[in-house]
Image (spheres, rainbow, N blue to C red):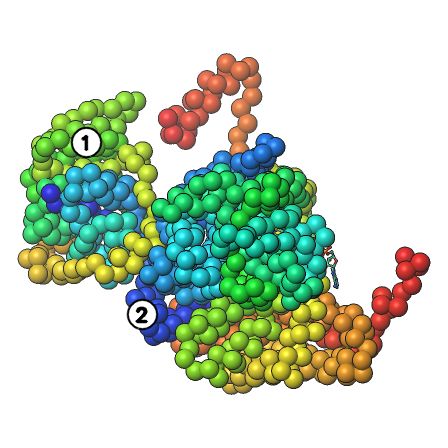
Amino acid sequence: MSDKLTDMRFIRFLLYEVYNVEELTQYPYHADHSRETFDMAIDAAYQLAREVFWPNYQEFDRNGAQFDGQHVQAPKGMHEIWRHCKEGGWFAPNISFDDGGQQFPMSIFAVTSFLFSCGNTSAAMYVNGTWGAAMLIDKFGSEALKAMYMRKLYAGDWAGTMALTEPDAGTSLGDIKATARKAPDGDYYLISGVKRFISSGDHDLTENIIHPVLARIEGAPAGVKGISLFLVPKFRVNDDGSPGEYNDVATAGIEHKMGLKGQATATLNFGEKGDCRGWLIGEANKGLPYMFELMNRARVFTGIQAVSGASVAYQWALQYARERLQSRDVTCRDVNSPQIPIINHPDVRTMLLKQKAFIEGALGMVLYCAKLADRMANSSDPEECENLNLILEVMTPCCKAHLSNASVESIIQALQCFGGAGYCEEFPVAQLLRDNKVFSIYEGANGIQAMDLLGRKVAMQAGAAVRALMMEIGATLAEAEALPALQDLAQKVQEVQNEVIETTMTLGAVGMSGQIQEYICNATAYLELFSQMLMGWQHLKHAIAAQRALDSETGEAPFYRGKIETARFYANTVLPHAVATARMLKANEYTALHYAEECF
Amino acid sequence: MKVAVLMKRVPDTASVFAVAADGKSVETGGLKYVMSPYDEHAVEEAIRLKEQAGAEVIVLSAGPPETKETLRSALAMGADAAMLVTGAENAGPRGLAKALAAALKRMAPDLVIAGKQAVDDDASQVPERVAELLGIPHASVITRFALSGSVATVDREIEGGSYTLEVPLPALFTTQKGINTPRYPTLPNIMKAKKKEITEVGVAELGLGAGDLAAGMAIESVSLPRQTRLKKIIEGEPAEKVRELVRVLRETEKIL
Ligand SMILES: Cc1cc2nc3c(=O)[nH]c(=O)nc-3n(C[C@H](O)[C@H](O)[C@H](O)COP(=O)(O)OP(=O)(O)OC[C@H]3O[C@@H](n4cnc5c(N)ncnc54)[C@H](O)[C@@H]3O)c2cc1C
């Protein structure tokens, strides 16, 4: 049925009409680029997503990754996907020409990864994970490690992972037990320990797999301050760069999961035989800060993954709603009249628009963040960089947590549009729902993101990050107020902004009084409130661009009118919930906190 | 060896189409344009030849200035250069063929490859007209191409079978699906494509006047395919049902 995975017109609108990513070509790093190269990259990614990733999507669910007791086989179709990504240079779009990349901005890379995730999110994870491992080596590794591993990863010759989690250390990474003992006779450490839930942890796609692993050097301080980052290859590398001896990284098994079945989520035993070598990345005991620097970016990508599922589900629901004939108009009394497409029923229309409004606001959020990252990476003005960084810091947990929460709700709406057919596996919507749930869990569970927002980001530098963000929102409000057609929208966003400021101050007072548990106990609700403000703000930015296009009569009026109406729908139907949440937060609601355990 | 590929920029057939207010054309606002899919096979075949035998591949198109974007996609697949003929946008198949033939005369390729038809108007005649104007042999709807010296051996698809032909170069061929799988543009090739040249030539420069480009036909009206589903249930014994079904398909629906 639908081979449309997303609305490409809307993505172009965001890139060129709202965020003006073309201006990034002014920076020397992107000087070889133009709108033409951006468009070609996006079109090529969409073509791959539709023609190579997507045809494997349901197949990955039915015949996922397999473990034969020793080795893991990736789903069959993954080999072809990998080959195309390798040939296409998709492991390193943003990396420098010197290191084998094409120096695309993150804004374009974010879109191409979004499209791959739309096509097949399990598959896209094999590719993105490899990029992430390479980035860690790129940023923090020695020249020797870079020469030996990084280019092979960026080229897609080898694959990479990220090995943090252990059976007793998921959220609480300070409790990691894996150890590293300095080899007496070499430049390496002997690693031992168990890592669990490792995405793309083992497979037969490449001749080698490179694991960045968090472990504790013997005698290191307890807690987060004693964790180091190691590079642990599955096969040691010979001097000529070819994979050599097996490095004692054994696969204990792969998980049987609710979704993402194409993904080999592996338990890995490092050093079962006492012969697993790891090389320190960067300095000792700095493993967590290194990892978090990358994870921060990865969290925006988790938001992107989440929206991709919602986008595909929406496209399917939309087409189904246009084709499924059921019932008659509520005012129609003629039982002999033909049944009508369900898109004409107000409730179905509302369900569709809820999804569309979520997806558009969400894509706005992630592309806004990507553009911030681009400006930060290219700006030579330290003050500007610091300001951009602060905004990115507050928005990151919201991108990760709000988008992954709300994408599941959005897919539920899509599934509902299908009625009984949605509950069956013929259509891909049920799978999209199952696949999507994990995004609220990995890369730091959403509850942890909420505490990060309220406990760290809001408080950082005496509130400087929130102030920097509020200034940006204020600038958008001022722009909108100058456009008579958008004043009602601007008012609603401003109302929520005021609520956020008041709530933050009320909670801040609780925190200052030393009631830390009370301060943090509604962090999730606070994150939702905060994120809805961000979404409303993004919609307003889109509405401004759309209104200007309408005013200058450049054509495509229905598209632009639709954009403004979507923003209005969000402001009118979602933002009131934000106001209600704010009221709850200001009312010192601690029932759950004080609820006695024996009463459960 | 010089290989020219004829390429057309067409609306993506996945788009939602509407008839324009004049009733004689398609509404173009918001349409996304792509390379006609059969032309992708032509470009692919030319690039394979380049990889195997070291040919120079030039992609040629006539169309509006935006056609350059589509030519760029062909360059990103690996073609070496491109030429755009402007001023023949409304020419129709006959005038278009004249414009392309004039450009090809300048280029003097050893081999011309085109898609078997463009998926916008499905006229299926431009490449054949071009070959006639150039006075070179042509074979259409080919599913296999092999070159040995200056003779091409090709399979032509025909109803229920195929012809194998030997054709001396220079010659023109049109490609059918199945001849190859077009490659996807790669990021490195996209960056390289940016640096490749697209030459622009106006029809006047090619010595063509308004008379040459006259469409030679007028479009009376454009309509969308019938959307409604007509349900008809055929009753009876299996044998009767089949007979009736075949009759309906043949006589009423004229599908067989
Ligand atoms: C499909 C999949 C892929 C994964 N891929 C990787 C990977 O590639 N690499 C990797 O290292 N890990 C990976 N993980 C692991 C993932 O990051 C962890 O599952 C996640 O961090 C949560 O840890 P946990 O499962 O141990 O849950 P727990 O830490 O036990 O958390 C359980 C619940 O308690 C809450 N909780 C815990 N502590 C607190 C607290 N202090 N305050 C408030 N609430 C708290 C959590 O929010 C959560 O809701 C993956 C997991 C899955 C399911």
Q: Where residue B146 is drawn, which disc sits there?
A: 1
Is residue B76 depicted above or below A65 in this figure?
A: below
Label 1: few (<14), some (14–19) or many (≥20) C-alpha neighbours in 10 Å: few
Residue at the front extreme of this rendering: A184
Q: Position of residue B130 (x, y in %)?
A: 13, 44
Q: Position of residue B67 (x, y in %)?
A: 26, 57
Q: Are marks 1 and 2 in contact (CB under 8 Å)?
A: no
Residue at the right extreme of this rendering: A598
Q: Residue at x 56, y 55 (%)?
A: A182
Image quadrant where one finds the C terminus of chain A:
bottom right
Query: Identity of the amino acid at label 1?
Result: Ala
The one nearer the camera, A158 or A183, is A183
Query: Identity of the amino acid at label 2?
Result: Ala
Q: In the image, is the residue at mark 2 within 8 Å of ligand 1 by its beta carbon? A: no
Give the residue at mark 2. Answer: A31
Can residue A463 be seen? yes
Is residue B193 depicted above or below A420 in this figure?
A: below
